[in-house]
Amino acid sequence: MKARVYLATTAGPVRIERLTRERAQQSAVCLGRTTKVLAVSAAYDAFVRQPSGVIEREFGPLEPGAFRLDVDGPVDDGESWQLGVFAAHMLAKDHALAGPDEPGDLVIWLTGAVHNDLGVAPVNHIPEKLRASEELFAALAMEGAKVTLVLPPGARPHAEAGGLPAGFEIAEIASTKELAEIIGAGGPTLTAGPRPQEPAAIKQGPGRWTARLMIALVALFLLLVIAFQAWHVWRAYDDLRQVADSGGLGDLASALEKADRSGWTGGLAADLLRR
């Protein structure tokens, strides 16, 4: 299943045409798949990035880079575009966002702000947005499309009073979890309400822990080697001391031979005594 996503604005509905991951420093909203970057891009980048935004947190881990969001019309700064953009990311994760040449199985018209805890907040000018979309609604009714208007809390009466075409559905939601249920997207596990606090320390990736473990093992091995050699040196010196105390030359030769076999440190001790 694929879905068309329309952002509700007072100037008319704006369709999200494409969402791609790019090798860029900042996420951007572009007009009609051209090189024209819209002024809302800065707000979109903040909506994407942690700690201010929610997209990277909910849809990660992501490859290095940023997002490019293509729309077919201008989008004001504000916050009412956030719910529709969140829906587009949710659909794109499952390859279910309909492109500009795809009719899609479902049409979603959205307006609403998304808070950091994934709650959906009310926005202004909903009656004006509904009136600005009347032409789109009529065209969708003619083609027999399955249409759902997704609204923030308290907005249902505006839509019901607007005389929507027969068959259009209205969904008033308070969280993005409800949005996931409406559009049937898999996506991440989405929860409304405060998220548990993350530790202040930066999380270490598996590669760093593996490197640290290897360094610790090498250090332990070297300590064991040094301890083993020190033990042999002590034994060699002890044997030589006992021979020196007894004055036996034959025992001295045996002790020197034993010191030579004890390794390079024992051999060093034997060489010193021979001198």
Image (spheres, grey):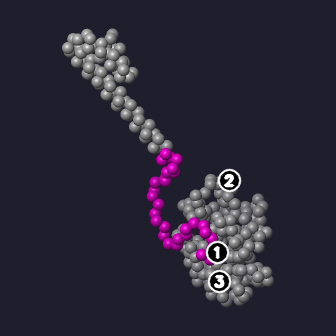
129 inside magenta stretch: no
The residue indicated by pointer 3 is 170
Marks 3 and 2 sit apart, C-alpha to C-alpha, by 38 Å
User: Which mark is first along the chain, 2 or 3?
Assistant: 2
Q: Which label is found at residue 183?
A: 1
Quadrant (top left, top right, bottom left, bottom right) of the N terminus: bottom right
Mark 1 vs 2: CB contact within 8 A: no
Tag shown at residue 259:
none
Crowd around label 2: few <14 · some 14–19 · many ≥20 (10 Å): few
The residue at the point 53 percent across, 71 percent down is 191
- Mark toward the viewer: 1 or 2: 1
State the extent of the magenta-drawn residues as a range.
181-210
Image position, residue 103 (x, y; %): 76, 73
Residue 30 visible = yes
- Mark 1 and mark 2 lie on one chain; the one further toward the N terminus is 2
List x then y, in percent, for residue 169. 67, 83
Depth order, front residue of 72/191: 191
What residue is disc 2 on?
23
Q: Nearer the viewer, mark 1 or mark 3?
A: 1
